[in-house]
Image (tube, rainbow, N blue to C red):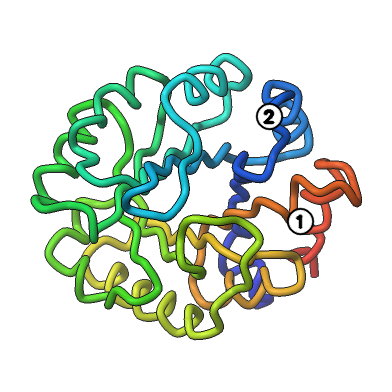
Amino acid sequence: MPESQQRPAPRLAPSILAADLGHLDTEIRRAGDGGADYIHIDVMDGRFVPNISIGLPVVEAARRATTLPLDVHLMIVEPERYIERFAEAGADLITVQVEACVHVHRTLQQIREAGCQAGLALNPGTPVSAIEETASLLDVVLVMSVNPGFGGQSFIPTSLSKIGRVRALLDAVNPAALIEVDGGIKPENARGIWQAGAGILVAGTAIFSPERSVADSIEAFRSVFID
């Protein structure tokens, strides 16, 4: 049986970190019209990562611009302080960094109690074992395939084996959970990342590009998975 029939093609989550924030509603609508599955929103505080990005007002604006699920990735210290507020702003999936959580189990419960799906993210240097005790509680594991903080970085090749190890862990305790991968993803490497076990691909500069339309960029990804 062809591989594409054995597993569904990955869902695509354009990251608005690379979008024109001056025309955010237009950019998000273009992504939705082009066939995106999620809108990915990176929240950075300048402490957990060396950059400051999007906050609550932008999540609220994104919610008004689309009915697509908002995939909110909190790259911040003390994420538990803001879970309810991001849920109220319109997040559907909230992912926190395992490295930023003192009480991971409690934080995941907090996300669920706020009415959102729960995700845990692993930085490139964080071992898969960091999610072993909470894997059964997760909807998504986000494997960072670059060091977080800035867009436009190159995919770290060793991330492929890590994706496979995460998939093996989830298959044992929580097979319904999806693996999301973020960092350096483009049409040229998307299929290999999917083959490793990814179910959601995050792409920023490869979608919001001055070289082609958002719709054409999304189609370039989709075409990789057509046999």
Q: Nearer the viewer, mark 2 or mark 1?
A: 2
Residue 194 shown left or right of residue 81 in the figure: right
Q: Position of residue 91 (x, y in %)?
A: 41, 28
Task: Say which amino acid is labelled 1.
Answer: Arg
Q: Position of residue 181 (x, y in %)?
A: 50, 62
Q: Position of residue 14 (x, y in %)?
A: 64, 45
In the image, residue 188 sits, relative to residue 109, either above or below, namely below
Crowding near pointer 2: few (<14 within 10 Å), some, many (20+)?
Answer: many
For the N terminus, the image quarter is bottom right
Q: Residue at x 31, y 32 (%)?
A: 116
User: In the structure shown, which secondary structural element does the residue marked by tag 2 occupy?
Assistant: helix
Crowding near pointer 1: few (<14 within 10 Å), some, many (20+)?
Answer: some
Q: Position of residue 89 (x, y in %)?
A: 40, 19
Q: Which residue is mark 2?
A: 28
Q: Name the residue nearer the viewer: 168 or 50.
A: 50
Marking on residue 153:
none
In the image, residue 26 sits, relative to residue 69, either above or below, namely above
Q: Which residue is mark 1?
A: 222
Does the CB distance between marks 2 and 1 fall below 8 Å? Answer: no
Q: Residue at x 18, y 37 (%)?
A: 80
For the C terminus, the image quarter is bottom right
User: In the structure shown, which secondary structural element does the residue marked by tag 1 occupy?
Assistant: helix
Q: Name the residue nearer the viewer: 157 or 81.
A: 81
Residue 102 shown left or right of residue 141 in the figure: left
Task: Say which amino acid is labelled 2.
Answer: Ile
In the image, residue 82 sits, relative to residue 179, either above or below, namely above
First along the sequence among labels 2 and 1: 2
